[in-house]
Image (cartoon, helix red, strand yellow):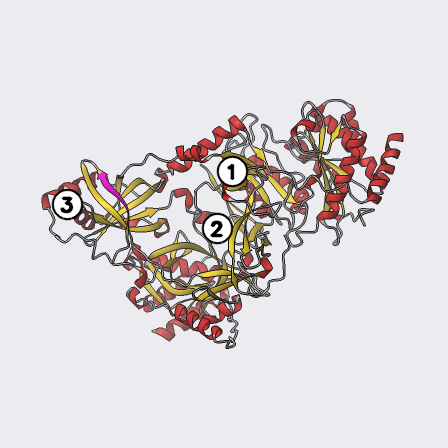
């Protein structure tokens, strides 16, 4: 077991098990995972900033036991920023905020392969910054079907003067985010809107789309999981790794790119491994940047 | 007087078997607080409530699940969980011995006194042997459906069993991310002198729980309807790194 | 899940207005000895290893949460209406705010003042209650390091009193691998005597004792708790893995699926938009 001491921005970190292969059927060690997050830091940090982190930890690798943590581990270095989020029962839960590189590396060192964050920031837990359409394909539907759904959603939203942004989930589906970034938005609003939109989609494309969570209707269709628009739910953060057999990434795409790749008919083109995610980001910048800054208002809600 | 006997077992290693009864060794003295309903001071009761519908759910409709990830659970029924319970055995198996001083207090969990449950011959010999060698027996046993790790020690003629935390339950110091600062020989010397000047012998009977008495006083005052003066505690200003030596020297002067 | 303004008396809330204590570690304050003051935070040193389960409603697997219920009103009580109190007579309770509690021993609730140092060896294990770590806050790292180093070199520990919430604890500060651990101690009068359980005949069979000492010496090793694992915990984990494979997981229901389509205006706008999409 190797241990390496590093210093980032004057903070000391003890990194362990660097040569441990956490993706054994592919070959991707802890060191490589940390290197990935270090290179992606400029792109991922703004999307993690000030959000309560839920991490899924795989200390024994993707094939081993995993556990998810919402509470910030008590044994954290003093410089890890935290926030207190009040729970329904009155308890104050201490959560980690990944606001800097050193915290991102510390989290990675805990084998937190997957980083999940809520739609609202920790300080304003009832104000979603964006609305999401979580597109989840039920077999034999696949990511190409999700792409079809996403493109229709794009147009549906455009006609209402709303712009959406798309990313892969890193697993089987796609996510469409609609930035709002307005202090008066509530989860009630985003849930109402997304549910209504999902219902319209299902009504007009009944063989392609379902808005129901039950198992049966999801077979062979793309499920638009509108219930993700909730204060208690989290989404995989853009640029996060996924714990699958290979280090796939939740990767953003430009709409034109999605159209082109989906048109090629090869679902594999919509799965991005870590190396590709890094080169895309370094070449094209953060395609999801607007999700954090664009201000939009959901129409017709009163 | 020792607490009541909570379990019976036998210490075992080699061909030695010493039947014992476990007694609790500590009885905490504290004022219990309760949760009340603000307007009328009524004592509240705890209920298990459905997270979504906010309606109470009776015990008969409750089941256990392990939360694998958000909203997804692995169900277990009580019989299956029971099957994971360790075989009940009355033996406290001693696997090895260590020097008592090697056991860091961070590992100590709960202490029990042992009472001999049969002829005290084996008990007395074991206690004397452990006491003379300053040793503790590292042992495992099963009690109340749980697997325990513990240290068997002697103090005078009494045998005691201290449950120990498992290694992975103690958070390693390395995870705290502490930095090392360089300290000058002078700072270290004066610091050492200061500590030695302030050293006394450990006299635990001198600790009085003053706070408890004051808290009771506060409650009585409030009950009489008197107003409580709110005293806001001061925060001491931290000693800056470049002031440390001076502060140490001034302290030493004060006490020497 | 509102994050309300800290209100005096709200239960399970350990912050007063303007206090960051609740959100960093368990407590934050200052260690002092003589004229040296070290800002610190108190954090956990131990983490229970037991597998914890959630209670679910067996009809649809929604997770259950603990809520407080008022028997007089016959209703659940929101967190803002909950206050801490003490029993002052049978069935009679007196509410106390966090600030009032802090006023009982104000200095000790913010400062751990080490007045004496002692030889660590003099503390019998029976006194130890619960361990924590102290980590230095900004500006305190050097003084913290000094205290840890000097205590380590002199094999001494600091004795102090410390108030957390409504309890006061005598505590021991000791150095451990370069860090400071704070261990709460039991009061002397909380430790029960053992005179009544000690065997009346104190005589020791020398032959037996000699034999036992030989056994002990043969089995003497270095203390390494990593050799021992919690057998029950492992069996529960194995059971969970087995069940995950055989039966898979159940999913808690999404928030109420019924509840209407939404505002008429919105539906109309969406339908109009969809019409245009289909025309393209």
Nearest-to-viewer mark from 2 and 3? 3
Which residues are drawn in magenta? B6-12
Q: Judge whether B62 appears above or below B34 on screen.
A: above
Q: Are marks 3 and 1 on the same chain?
A: yes
Tell which subunit mark 3 falls on. B
Give the Cα separation between the discs numbered 2 and 3: 50 Å
Do we see residue A256 in this rendering? no
Decide whether residue B9 is among the magenta residues: yes
Q: Position of residue C103 (x, y in %)?
A: 49, 71
Q: How far apart are marks 3 and 1 (CA)?
A: 47 Å
Q: Tag 2's secondary structure?
A: helix
Q: Tell me residue B54's x, y (percent).
A: 60, 48
Mark 3 falls on what kind of element? loop
Single out the mark in the foreground, 1 or 2: 1
The lab-note entry on whether marks 1 and 2 share a chain reads yes
The residue where tag 2 is placed is B176
Q: In which quarter of the image is the C terminus of chain B?
A: bottom left
Q: Is residue A278 visible?
A: yes
Label disc, if present, on residue B119 of the rendered structure: 3
Marks 1 and 2 sit apart, C-alpha to C-alpha, by 32 Å
The dot on residue B65 is: 1
User: Is the residue marked by circle 2 packed among few (<14), some (14-19), or many (20+) residues within 10 Å?
Assistant: many
Q: Is residue B29 left or right of residue C246?
A: left
Q: Is residue C200 above or below residue B38?
A: above
Between C193 and A37, the residue placed more toward the observer is C193
C-beta proximity under 8 Å, tags 3 and 1: no
């Amino acid at each position: 077991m190797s241990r390496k001491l590093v210093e980032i921005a004057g903070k000391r970190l003890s990194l362990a098990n660097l040569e441990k292969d956490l993706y054994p059927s592919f070959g991707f060690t802890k060191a490589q995972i940390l290197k990935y997050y270090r290179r992606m830091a400029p792109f991922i940090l703004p999307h993690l900033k000030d959000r309560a982190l839920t991490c899924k930890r795989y200390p024994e690798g993707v094939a081993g036991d995993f556990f998810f943590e919402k509470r910030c581990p008590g044994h954290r270095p003093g410089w890890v920023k935290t926030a207190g989020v009040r729970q329904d029962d009155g308890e104050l839960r201490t959560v980690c905020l990944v606001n800097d590189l050193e915290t991102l590396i510390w989290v990675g060192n805990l084998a937190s392969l997957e980083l999940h964050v809520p739609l609202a920031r920790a300080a304003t837990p009832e104000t979603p910054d964006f609305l999401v359409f979580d597109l989840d394909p039920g077999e034999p539907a696949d990511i190409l079907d999700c792409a079809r759904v996403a493109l229709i959603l794009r147009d549906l939203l455009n006609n209402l003067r709303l712009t959406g942004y798309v990313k892969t989930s890193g697993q089987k589906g796609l996510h469409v985010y609609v930035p709002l970034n307005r202090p008066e938005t509530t989860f009630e609003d985003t849930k109402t809107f997304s549910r209504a939109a999902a219902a319209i989609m299902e009504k007009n494309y009944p063989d392609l789309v379902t808005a129901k969570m039950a198992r049966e209707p999801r077979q062979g269709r793309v499920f638009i999981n509108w219930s993700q628009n909730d204060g208690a739910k989290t989404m995989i953060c853009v640029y996060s790794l996924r714990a699958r057999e290979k280090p796939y990434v939740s990767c953003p795409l430009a709409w034109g790119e999605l159209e082109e790749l989906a048109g090629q008919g090869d679902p594999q083109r919509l799965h991005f491994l870590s190396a590709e995610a890094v080169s895309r980001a370094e070449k094209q910048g953060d395609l999801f940047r607007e999700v954090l800054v664009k201000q939009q208002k959901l129409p017709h809600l009163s | 007087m020792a607490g009541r006997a909570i379990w019976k077992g036998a210490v075992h290693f080699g061909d030695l078997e010493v039947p014992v009864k476990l007694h609790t060794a500590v009885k905490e003295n504290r004022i219990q607080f309760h949760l009340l309903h603000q307007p009328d001071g009524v004592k509240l009761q705890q209920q298990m409530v459905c997270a979504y519908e906010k309606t109470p759910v009776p015990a008969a409709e409750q089941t256990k699940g392990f939360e694998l990830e958000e909203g997804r659970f692995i169900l277990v029924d009580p019989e299956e969980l029971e099957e994971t319970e360790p075989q009940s055995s009355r033996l406290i198996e001693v696997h090895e011995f260590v020097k008592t001083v090697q056991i860091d207090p961070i590992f100590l969990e709960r202490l029990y006194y042992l009472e001999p449950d049969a002829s005290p011959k084996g008990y007395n010999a074991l206690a004397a042997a452990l006491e003379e060698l300053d040793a503790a027996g590292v042992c495992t046993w099963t009690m109340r459906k749980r697997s325990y790790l513990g240290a068997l020690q002697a103090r005078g003629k009494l045998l005691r069993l201290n449950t120990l935390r498992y290694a992975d339950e103690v958070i390693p110091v390395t995870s705290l991310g502490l930095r090392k600062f360089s300290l000058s020989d002078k700072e270290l010397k004066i610091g050492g002198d200061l500590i030695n000047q302030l050293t006394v012998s450990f006299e635990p009977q001198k600790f009085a729980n003053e706070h408890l008495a004051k808290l009771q006083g506060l409650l009585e005052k409030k009950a009489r309807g008197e107003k409580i003066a709110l005293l806001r505690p001061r925060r001491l200003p931290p000693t800056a790194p470049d002031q440390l030596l001076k502060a140490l020297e001034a302290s030493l002067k004060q006490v020497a | 899940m509102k994050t309300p303004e800290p209100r005096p008396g709200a239960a399970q809330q350990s912050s007063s207005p303007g206090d960051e204590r609740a959100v960093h570690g368990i407590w934050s304050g200052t260690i002092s000895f003589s004229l040296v003051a070290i800002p610190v935070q108190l954090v956990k040193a131990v983490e229970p290893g037991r597998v914890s389960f959630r209670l679910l409603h067996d009809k649809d697997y929604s997770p259950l949460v603990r809520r407080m219920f008022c028997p007089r009103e016959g209703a659940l009580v929101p967190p803002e209406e909950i206050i801490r109190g003490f029993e002052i007579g049978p069935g009679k309770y007196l509410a106390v705010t966090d600030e009032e509690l802090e006023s009982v021993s104000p200095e000790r609730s913010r400062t751990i003042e080490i007045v004496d140092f002692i030889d660590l060896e003099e503390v019998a294990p029976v006194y130890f209650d619960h361990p924590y770590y102290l980590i230095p806050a900004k500006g305190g790292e050097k003084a913290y390091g000094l205290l840890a180093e000097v205590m380590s070199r002199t094999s001494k520990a600091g004795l102090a009193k410390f108030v957390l919430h409504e309890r006061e604890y005598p505590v021991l500060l000791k150095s451990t691998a370069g860090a400071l651990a704070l261990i709460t101690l039991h009061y002397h009068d909380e430790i029960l005597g053992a005179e009544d359980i000690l065997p009346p005949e104190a005589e020791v069979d020398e032959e037996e004792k000699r034999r036992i000492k030989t056994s002990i010496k043969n089995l003497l090793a270095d203390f390494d708790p990593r050799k021992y694992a919690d057998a029950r915990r492992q069996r529960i984990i194995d059971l969970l893995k087995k069940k995950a494979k055989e039966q898979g997981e159940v999913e808690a229901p999404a928030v109420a699926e019924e509840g209407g389509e939404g505002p008429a205006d919105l539906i109309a706008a969406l339908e109009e938009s969809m019409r245009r999409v289909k025309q393209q």
